[in-house]
Image: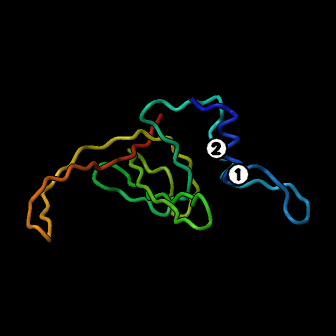
């Protein structure tokens, strides 16, 4: 559960509170407007994705939305995620706010160590984000 103080702390850490520009006018980061309402609680297995949809295309029976999220600081690269949905919810270069269910499946494969020649089993997971549609 999110506490208001925790959200404010995280927002101030990343400079997301409203402030003033050089001329003294009040400004607010676009990301700050997208922070979840403190009274809203995410259920286990849910995530809020906020960013810019750079493409949306049909993949089988679903639409795949490629979303680039803002970088947490000027020295980091932005994260890019794929959100799957039954319907198209955004077009290219459109800002989005998606509530998603986290899904995925276990995947394993064998690999060979180049130095020793030993084969070993690698276990990993493929994560999927599914838009929660009303």
User: Residue 20, how many percent across, how many down?
Assistant: 85, 57
- Mark 2 closeness class: few <14, some 14–19, many ≥20 residues within 10 Å: some
Name the mark on residue 106: none
- What residue sits right under mark 2 in the picture? 35
Which residue lies at the image location 49% right of the left edge and 63% below the top edge?
A: 54
Which residue lies at the image location 34% right of the left edge and 49% below the top edge?
A: 62
Q: Quarter holding the N terminus? A: top right
Q: Is residue 117 above or below residue 18?
A: below
Farthest residue to the bottom: give it: 115
Which residue lies at the image location 42% right of the left edge and 35% below the top edge?
A: 45
Q: Are marks 1 and 2 in contact (CB under 8 Å)?
A: yes
- What residue sits right under mark 1 in the picture? 16
Farthest residue to the right: give it: 24
Residue 106 left/right relative to 127: left
Q: Provide the secondary structure element on which disc 1 rests.
A: loop
Farthest residue to the front: give it: 116
The colour style of the image is rainbow
- Mark 1 closeness class: few <14, some 14–19, many ≥20 residues within 10 Å: some
Q: Nearer the viewer, mark 1 or mark 2?
A: 1
Residue 57 left/right relative to 29: left
Q: Nearer the viewer, residue 25 or 4?
A: 4
Q: Nearer the viewer, residue 72 or 52?
A: 72
Which residue lies at the image location 8% right of the left edge and 62% below the top edge?
A: 118
Q: Provide the secondary structure element on which disc 2 rests.
A: loop
User: Residue 37, how many percent across, how many down?
Assistant: 65, 35
Q: Nearer the viewer, residue 87 or 125?
A: 125
Real-space CA distance between mark 1 and mark 2, rounded to the nearest whole angstrom:
9 Å
């Amino acid at each position: 559960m999110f506490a208001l103080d925790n959200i404010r702390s995280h927002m101030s850490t990343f400079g997301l509170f409203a402030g003033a520009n050089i001329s003294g006018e009040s400004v607010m980061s676009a990301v700050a407007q997208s922070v979840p309402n403190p009274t809203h609680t995410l259920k286990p297995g849910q995530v809020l994705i906020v960013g810019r949809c750079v493409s949306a295309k049909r993949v089988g029976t679903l639409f795949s939305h490629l979303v680039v999220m803002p970088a947490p600081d000027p020295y980091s690269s932005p994260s890019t995620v794929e959100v799957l949905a039954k319907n198209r919810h955004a077009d290219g270069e459109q800002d989005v706010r998606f509530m998603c269910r986290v899904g995925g499946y276990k995947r394993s494969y064998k690999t060979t160590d180049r130095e020793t020649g030993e084969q070993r089993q690698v276990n990993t997971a493929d994560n999927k984000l599914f838009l929660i549609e009303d």
